[in-house]
Amino acid sequence: MSDHTTAHASPAPSNDPVENVVHVVPLVLPVVGGIMMLLLAFIAVYMA
């Protein structure tokens, strides 16, 4: 009499682009931080 199947549910899990990037964040953040410190130090020495 009443069918409770979900017809709108997707059988395959969705591909989240954030999950593809999360495993790289611990490597990218220190590298970018180091580059920023070097650039800021260069600017400070150049301006002095």
Image (tube, rainbow, N blue to C red):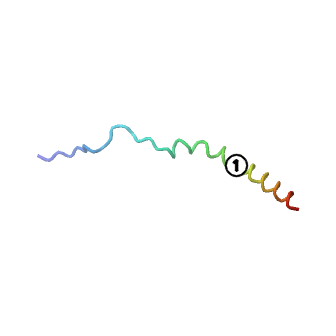
Residue ranking furthest to the bottom: 48
SS label for mark 1: helix
Classify 46 as above or below 10: below
**Vertical arrangement, residue 44 with respect to residue 21, above or below:** below
Measuring 33% from the left and 38% from the top, which residue is drawn there?
Answer: 11
Q: Is 45 placed left or right of 35 in the picture?
A: right
For badge 1, the amino acid type reads Val
Note whether 30 is above or below 47 in the view shown. Answer: above
Front position in the image: 17 or 40: 40
Q: Write the residue at 66% across / 45% down.
A: 28
Q: Residue at x 79, y 51 (%)?
A: 38
Q: Quadrant of the C terminus?
A: bottom right
The residue pinned by badge 1 equals 32
> In the displayed image of the protein, which residue is found farthest to the top?
12
Res 24 → quadrant: top right
Q: Residues within 10 Å of mark 1 (few under 14, many from 20)?
A: few
| Position above or below: 13 against 43 | above
Q: Is residue 15 left or right of residue 32?
A: left
Q: Residue 31: x and y, percent?
A: 71, 46
> Can you name the residue that lies furthest to the right here?
48
